[in-house]
Each structure stands twice: as structure tokens, then as C-alpha cells.
Amino acid sequence: MIARAAVLALLLGAGGAAAQPLGWSADEVRVVLRHGPWPPPMARDPSNRVSGNRDAIALGERLFFEPRLSQGGQLFCASCHVPYRAWQDGRTRARGLAEVDRNTPSVLNVRLQRWFGWDGAGDSLWAQSLRPILDAREMGASAAQVAALMREDAEYACRYRKSFGTAPATDDADVLVAVGKALAAFQETLASGRSAFDDFRDAIERGEREALERYPRAAQRGLRIFVGKGACNVCHLGPAFTNGEFHDVGVPFFIRGGVDPGRHGGIRRLQASAYNLLGRHNDDQSGAAATRTKHVALEHRNFGEFKVPGLRNVALTAPYMHNGSLATLADVVRHYSELNVERLHADGEAILKPLRLSSQESVDLVAFLESLTERKSALDERRAALPCSR
């Protein structure tokens, strides 16, 4: 308790001149502590009966690198979600069999989401895993193609039985969903490691002054902007730095031949999907997992809204925004600093306003965002665990 009191004194500016107090407020300290601890504990997905199943995780990993899940055997999930690129592709917009309209998000920490995809058209990770397989512009496969692979390939048929307790079903859709659930079980294991920010946050909680002082001053100043003047934590909150919801942040949503409806279109697709949690493929017998899907409502304000991404490892996942229109973190900070409020919906984000950051404040905010990157040792360990080829 004495050590923690000394750390809080340093943060709050009560440490004396020799201690170089940082001048944080008690409210700021409380907000910072809410961004952890990290990593959060694993939790099974009740809608997926093989969530957490070791055999299903192994099957899902193989399927993630399996080109036969695509039309013509050209592509696999990792073609866009590239492990050594923080599980995204570095492109402005994803490219499968053709270029699509949106940027590829990382699948790190995807298990913590409650809506999936930039528009939230998926209400489970396993349903979201089916979308690129079936999308004509991405992998372009069909339920029949996927089911045939599971039935006819002896190794996959064996792994399927070990994972699900039965041979691949005669119903193609059932086999397709099982593949989605195995892919989801694997993706649930993909989590970013601890960062310099986590050490700083935990140093406050534990009263570890030396660890506190190792956190760069520029990152500390940027963090104060993040939770203070910038109010970035209103949307980028909690340990994953996201509220998991959808907002219009003034990024244009025009695409070739029209506009991207964002969340508005996502809700329509979710409600029409045979694979949503209201359907027969949901393994949660209690019905609790489907509650949010049952009550989601389509509103005009949803047009042009896109999901708030988590910020962990954000320095590794350029370019940014749903359409990849901002090349660097400095560009993202500039966007919010010079925000054009006329681009926001009339009934949109009243909380947003231009931040009018100085050059130094912008640099500091970028320094904080960069401090959310996991340690190189964690990156290397995860890369070493991946197969060299498939």
C-alpha cells in the first residue's frame, strides 16, 4: 500500500520537485486503470459447441491456411489475414478474387467482439468466418465445395470426427457451419501480447515506481490527451480499446458505383442471414447469445456508420479506417484534429468536434498509440509457433 501511495503521489503531482511529478488528476488515473488488465481471461462462445476444443482449434488452424476453401484453390483465409502483418494485409482495401470495398481488419483479439465485420453483419465469430468463403469477390466457394472437401479428404474427415464427434453431415450447410466453428475456435486463440502501456497501467495498480518511470514521457502526455482533451476513450474504451459499436466519424463512404451503407446494410444482412444466432445453427440452448440479435433495430442514423476498431497493435495495422483511406497514425490524428463536422450525419456523433491539437500534442498522441504495440518478444513467439507452409 505504501508503494502504491508513492506512485499515486508521483502521478498526482504530490511527490515534490525532486520526484518530477506528472500532474495527473485522480479521475485520469481511474480512467487509465479501466484499460486493463491485459490479457483478459479466455471465455467459451456458448453459440459454438467446439469453442475451446483442442481438436477443433487444430482443425481450424489447418483450414485457415487451406486454399481448397476457395474457388480454383487460389486463396485462403491467411491470404488477407497475414500472420506476419499482424493478421491483416497492409492493403488499402482487401483483395480476394477481386478487390472489395473495405480494409482488412486484423483478427487479433477478435474473440472479444460482439459484432463482426466493419458493418456488424455477423453476430458470431463462426458466422463471420463463413462470409469471405462464400463471397464471390473474396474466396468465391460454396457450401457444396466446402462439404465435399470435408467428406472426401481423409485427413479432414478424420479431424472433423475428432472435433465434432461425428462424420461430416449429409447436409452441406451443416458441414459449412462446422467449418466456420472450427475456424472460429482457432481465431479465438489469437490474442495480442502485452505492451508498454500495460506495464505502465499495472505499475499504477501495483505501486511499482520503476516500471512507471520506464514509460516514455511522450506516451504519457499522449495518454493524457487520449483520456482528457481528446476524449478518445469515449469510444475506444476498456482493455481492448473499443466499445464494439458503430459510429460515423466523418470518413467518406462513397465507393465505386454508389455508397457503402455501413451498419445500415450490415443490420439488413444480419437479419436476412440463415447463419445468424436466431437460426438453427446456434448451439446456445439458453437463447442468451441471441438476445442482442433479437433486439437489434434498423435506424436511419446507421447509414454510413462503421465499427470502432480496437487499438491494440494499431501501429502494425496501417492503413486505417474502414476504407483504408488514412495511411499513417499521424494521418488519423490529423483527421480528428481537423475534423470536418459537416461530413457527420445531422443525427450523428454529437460528441465529435475538431480537437485542434498542436504539433507537439499530435506527436505525443501518436507516441501513445504506438505504445499499445505488443512487445517484440511476443510477436516473435507467435510467429515461431506458426507453420512455415501448408
Image (spheres, helix red, strand yellow):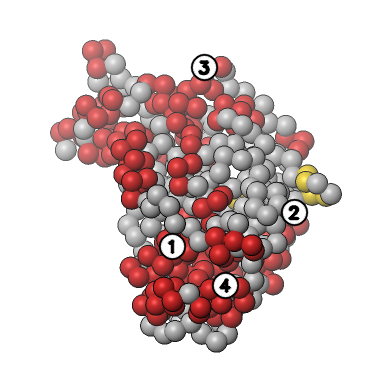
Per the image, the residue denoted by label 3 is 360
How far apart are labels 3 and 4 at the CA level? 53 Å
Mark in front: 1 vs 2: 1
Q: Is residue 145 left or right of residue 17?
A: right
Percent coordinates x, y for residue 345 in the rendering: 75, 45
At label 2, the amino acid type is Pro
Q: Around disc 4, counting alpha carbons within 10 Å, would you say few (fewer than 14), some (14 to 19), or many (20 or more)? A: many
How far apart are labels 4 and 2 at the CA level? 30 Å
Residue at (55, 57) in percent of width and height: 76
Residue at (54, 23) in percent of width and height: 362
Judged from the image, the secondary structure of the residue bearing numbered disc 4 is: helix
Percent coordinates x, y for residue 10 in the rendering: 27, 24
Earlier residue among tags 3 and 4: 4
Mark in front: 3 vs 4: 4
Earlier residue among tags 1 and 3: 1
Say if residue 267 shows up in the picture. Answer: no
Compared with 83, 230 (above or below) is above
Q: Quadrant of the C terminus?
A: bottom left
How far apart are labels 1 and 4 at the CA level? 14 Å
At label 4, the amino acid type is Val
Compared with 229, 103 (above or below) is below
Name the one closer to the observer, 128 or 204. Answer: 128
Per the image, the residue denoted by label 2 is 261
At label 1, the amino acid type is Arg
Earlier residue among tags 4 and 2: 4
Kindly check if marks 1 and 4 are in contact, taking CB atoms under 8 A apart as contact: no
